[in-house]
Amino acid sequence: MNMTARNPIAVDGYVVDVLLRDLAGHDRSPAAFLVYLFLWRHTLGQRRREPLRVSHQGIANETGLSKSAVQQALRILHRRGLVESTRQHQTDTPEHRVVRAWERSGRKPSVRTARR
């Protein structure tokens, strides 16, 4: 995995138009958006369908987040159904797969609005 690539990527408009506001605003976790964008870049952004094998510490090093912030971000992304992570055994490095639920179902996922 080339973590220093400077190639442009195409990101689904839904990611920027809806998920950015929803994750950073409603969930109060800009880290979740950063982790999602990082995983997108290294999978779908490179037209890869296979999951990305990277540790929480590896994500933290590449995004500038703390390991605990990455762990919390992944909990949010898992709960939202935006990322699926698997491992063969408890101490194995996880494989993360970005999920675009809005494309599978043919409709956009419900967006929770922040209370004011």
Image (tube, rainbow, N blue to C red):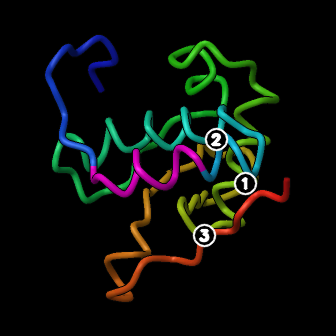
**Vertical comparison of 5 with 90: above or below:** above
Q: Secondary structure at mark 1?
A: helix
Q: Position of residue 88 (x, y in %)?
A: 60, 60
Amino acid under disc 1: Ile
In the rendered image of this protein, does residue 65 appear above or below residue 53?
Answer: above
First of labels 2, 3 by sequence position = 2
| Label pair 3/1, CB-CB below 8 angstroms | no
The circle drawn on residue 15 is none
Between marks 2 and 3, how big is the CA–CA gap? Answer: 15 Å
Magenta part of the protein: which range?
12-21
**Mark on residue 76?**
1
Image location of residue 100, percent across then percent down:
39, 67
* Position of residue 88 in the picture relative to residue 14 (left or right): right
Q: Position of residue 55 (x, y in %)?
A: 60, 33
Residue on which disc 3 sits: 111
Residue drawn at (22%, 15%) of the image:
5
* Residue type, mark 3 in image: Val
